[in-house]
Amino acid sequence: MAESPPQESSGSPGPGFDAETVRRMATLARLRLAEEEIPPLVEHFGRMMEFVTVLAEGDDPAVEPFRLEPVLFERLRGDAPIPAGEPGGPTSLEAWQRCAPEVDGPYFTVPRVVGGE
């Protein structure tokens, strides 16, 4: 993949940022912008993209690149039944209900959050 030549900063908005792009971004973000708000945003986004371009060009040998280490162990358990009462095994409903503040039969009772009392 060929690299594009570096673009010099001309004080104009970054590549691809014009008033129509800002309007489309505002629509996607469900924002209503007045026409007088668009030119400052075009300039702002252009400066942001110029800054990102500068950051992308930088290479600091003192900073090591981020690498994900491979997983050294299996995080998921095997698909085998575990008897009740053993670590990782099922616990009885009664044991869980003893910890609950309030129950109604086999159900946990929680305060209503939506829709009032």
Image: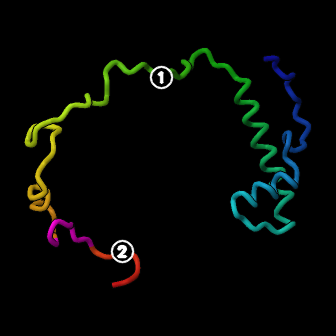
The quadrant where residue 25 appears: bottom right
In the rendered view, does 113 fall on the left or right side of 27? left
Task: Kindly indicate whether the residue at mark 1 contacts the one at mark 2 (C-beta within 8 angstroms).
Answer: no
Which span of residues is magenta-colored?
A: 104-110
Which residue ends up furthest to the top in the rendered image?
61
Q: Position of residue 78 (x, y in %)?
A: 25, 28
Q: Which residue was labeled with disc 2?
A: 113
Let me know if residue 62 is in the magenta part.
Answer: no
Q: Residue 37, how many percent across, how many down?
A: 82, 63
- Residue sitting farthest toward the bottom: 117
Which residue is rendered at x = 86% and y = 39% of the image? Answer: 15
Camera-side residue: 12 or 82?
A: 82
- Which image quarter holds the C terminus? bottom left
Secondary element type, mark 1:
loop
Circle 1 is placed at which residue position? 68
Q: Quadrant of the N terminus?
A: top right
Residue in the image at 85% along x and 42% along y? 16
Amino acid type for the residue under numbered disc 2: Val
Q: Nearer the viewer, mark 2 or mark 1?
A: 2
Q: Which one is earlier in the sequence, the residue at label 2 or at label 1?
A: 1
Q: Nearer the viewer, residue 24 or 105?
A: 105
**Mark 2 Cα-neighbour bin, 10 Å: few <14, some 14–19, many ≥20:** few
Look at the numbered disc 2 and give the secondary structure of its residue. loop
